[in-house]
Image: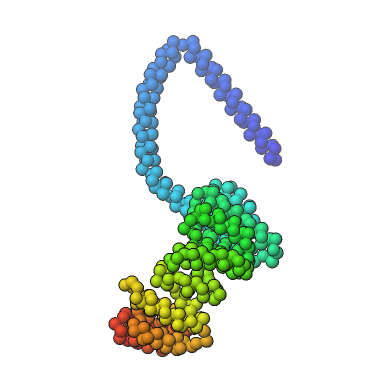
Amino acid sequence: MFRHAMRRHKKSLDGSHETVSLSSVLEFGQGKSSASGSNRLRERNEDEGSSNNASEKSDFFHKEFLISSRLKQEPRYRKQTDHYKEKHSKIMRKKMEEGFAQKVGIENLFSVCAKMGKEVGVNEYNGMIKVCIHSARISDDVESALDHIRKAIEYLKEINKCGSIIGKGTYVPLLKFLVDMGMVEEFQISKDVILESNSDALGQVGYYEMLLWIQVDDEEKIHELCRTIEDSENSLSVLQEYYMIALCEKDRKENLQRLLEIVDITKVSSPRLLANIFGYLGRSLLESMAMKFHRELQMCGKDGVKTVSNLIFSYATSIPNSTVKDAVLKFNKLHEELDIMPSSTSYDKLITYLYDSNEVATALNVADNMRKAGHSSSHSIGDQDS
């Protein structure tokens, strides 16, 4: 039936072609033998000429209108395009973080991006690195984990080749993993790539490098980095301060004991390092050294009292085997010994500490003392007693 219908359709088409062809021939022959036909043809051409002129003018104005409209719409179109690209990039990044790359395979994701007309850029490489780190963490096979990390480093290099800065959100998770796994060679490669792209990352990278040598128990490397602090002539660079933060966090007494005798505490610029030093002193029960540093800081600078009050909090709340109430007593005692009033910042920190420890009644008492001292609390718990 389908073939029969197609034959009928073809026959009707052939017949229509024959009719058109015959009528065209007859009309052409009559026009050739008739003068009046020629005149009519000339008149028709003149009419067509005038109508063509009108048509050309109409076309011209129509084109002008289209160009004008297009120019007006171009910024809007560009904005819509940029919005689409941004949204598309976010969707792709989200899909990668949700495991889309793991399902299709990381290599296949590049071809997926290409088919969708999406160039692989910094955001995509960042997503790939996260996927690789996650895959390496959950892998039970050493070779597979190594393969994922090598890929992550290659993507790190690609970001560098793009001329983009490798940000903290990209390099910190990678360095953390490499430190946890004690992957020295991979760390050194990553370190070079990161610092080539982002020289401002020197301190952070140095912090993780010290953690790495501590993790793998390489005493020679630890002492090598510590010697740079010993040779600093009291004033510390950003890199050296980050070395000390790592030492404090890991309670490296054998290194810190000598360094804290050399370093001028008043020249430490990092609040994070100061808090870590006093936290370490609290954990090590080195109250005499803590008081010495408190007095030195108290005598220097217009913010000396405020700084000391905050560091008393760091010290008092780090003492091992003490209750929350013991920490409050130590906080008050050290302020009295140094003859200073707690700052509003240290009061707020103490209230938050008590609240997080479920010591609400004690927190309310501290908030009341804070108000009596003329400070206003930024913590909502301080208003519950009013």
Q: Is residue 251 above or below residue 89?
A: below
Query: What is the x, y in percent for residue 138?
Result: 64, 66
- Left or right, 302 with respect to 138, comes to left
Counting every numbered tag in the picture gives 0
Looking at the rendered image, the quarter that the C terminus falls into is bottom left
Question: Front-most of 72 and 339?
Answer: 339
Q: Is residue 335 visible?
A: yes
Query: What is the x, y in percent for residue 267?
Result: 40, 69
Question: Front-most of 111 and 350?
Answer: 350
- Left or right, 142 with respect to 78, comes to right
Query: What is the x, y in percent for residue 64?
Result: 36, 34
Question: Front-most of 77 and 46?
Answer: 77
- Left or right, 368 with respect to 207, comes to left
Single out the residue that lies furthest toward the left.
374
Q: Residue at x 63, y 56 (%)?
A: 150
Q: How is the image coloured?
A: rainbow
Q: Residue at x 44, y 14 (%)?
A: 37
Q: Is residue 187 above or below residue 26?
A: below
Q: Is residue 96 visible?
A: no
Q: Is residue 122 above or below residue 66?
A: below
Looking at the rendered image, the quarter that the N terminus falls into is top right
Q: Residue at x 55, y 54 (%)?
A: 193
Q: Residue at x 42, y 81 (%)?
A: 291
